[in-house]
Image: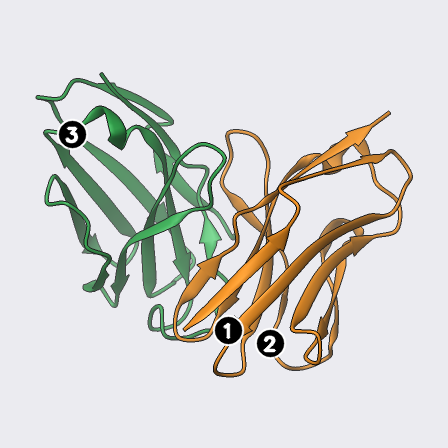
Chain colours: A green, B orange
């Protein structure tokens, strides 16, 4: 099973709302990632978790708060977002110890389409 | 630091024609290279990857890519395009971290 699942598929929220995105994998992967993808652009890395510890934070604003409750789950908590945060949020996982294992294939979920009003 | 450049943001071919998507990389260390495909409103799916074994890499859906160190290239090809190949294609380089190219949108005309 090479599936990464993400919920919800679509999310519309106001700027004062608090919401969470969820990602799950059952491949035994030890690294998990959050990416943001704007329309017609490549994915931009936001966070990397390695063995359930945050290992990379690409200077993401604090209104985005990641959480890795266990090795299979990754959450992204959203609070006080701006309209420019509207994008496709992709979760990925890879087998090795994290982003430094260059040969590892990253397996992507289908994404959550977020719209901030 | 490493980077990739995808030549052509949009490529259009006729069904049955050769597909050629270009990717050039820059890396100060031996790179690992990937091609991903993204269908509309979906995540990215790995097509193939180069990890310093064979320079000609075969992937899924009939795609292949050849690593050419002298040209710092990793172009993606498919002998005969199918309508279902229409998608966005991303080249990525991984050395110290993973960097994606800007993407190439492939259109297949009937």
Quarter of the image with the C terminus of chain B is: top right
Q: Mark 2–mark 3 contact, CB under 8 Å?
A: no
Instruction: Give the Cα distance between marks 1 and 2.
Output: 6 Å
Label 3: chain? A
Q: Position of residue B26 (x, y in %)?
A: 53, 71
Label 2: chain? B
Q: Say left or right for B63 vs B26.
A: right
Badge 1: residue crowd in 10 Å (few <14, some 14–19, many ≥20): many
Label 1: chain? A
**Hey, which quadrant is residue A117 in on the image?**
top left
Quarter of the image with the N terminus of chain B is: bottom left
Q: Position of residue A111 (x, y in %)?
A: 41, 36
Q: Mark 1–mark 2 contact, CB under 8 Å?
A: yes
Q: Give the camera-side residue of B83 and A30.
A: B83
Name the residue carrying label 1. A103
Name the residue carrying label 3. A81
Name the residue carrying label 2. B51
Badge 3: residue crowd in 10 Å (few <14, some 14–19, many ≥20): many
Badge 2: residue crowd in 10 Å (few <14, some 14–19, many ≥20): some
Give the mark nearer the N terminus: 1 vs 3: 3
Indicate which label's residue lies in the foreground, 2 or 3.
3
The residue at the point 33 percent across, 54 percent down is A33
């Amino acid at each position: 099973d090479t599936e990464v699942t993400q919920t919800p598929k679509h999310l519309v929220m106001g700027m004062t709302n608090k919401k969470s995105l969820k990602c799950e994998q059952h491949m035994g992967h030890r690294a998990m990632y959050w990416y943001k993808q704007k329309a017609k652009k490549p994915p931009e890395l936001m966070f990397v978790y390695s063995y359930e510890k945050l290992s990379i934070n690409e200077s993401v604003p604090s209104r985005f708060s990641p959480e890795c409750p266990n090795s299979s789950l990754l959450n992204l908590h959203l609070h006080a977002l701006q309209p420019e945060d509207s994008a496709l949020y992709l979760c990925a996982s890879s087998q090795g110890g994290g982003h430094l294992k260059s040969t590892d294939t990253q397996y992507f979920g289908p994404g959550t389409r977020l719209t901030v009003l | 630091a490493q980077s990739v450049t995808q030549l052509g943001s949009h490529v259009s071919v006729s069904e049955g024609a050769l597909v050629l998507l270009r990717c050039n990389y820059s890396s100060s260390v031996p790179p690992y290279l990937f091609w991903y495909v993204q269908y509309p409103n979906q995540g990215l799916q790995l097509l193939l990857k180069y990890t310093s074994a064979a320079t000609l890499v075969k992937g899924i859906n009939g795609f292949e890519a050849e690593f050419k160190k002298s040209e710092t290239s990793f172009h993606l090809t498919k002998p005969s395009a199918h309508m279902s190949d229409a998608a966005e294609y991303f080249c990525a380089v991984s050395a110290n971290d993973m960097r994606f190219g800007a993407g190439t949108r492939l259109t297949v005309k009937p």
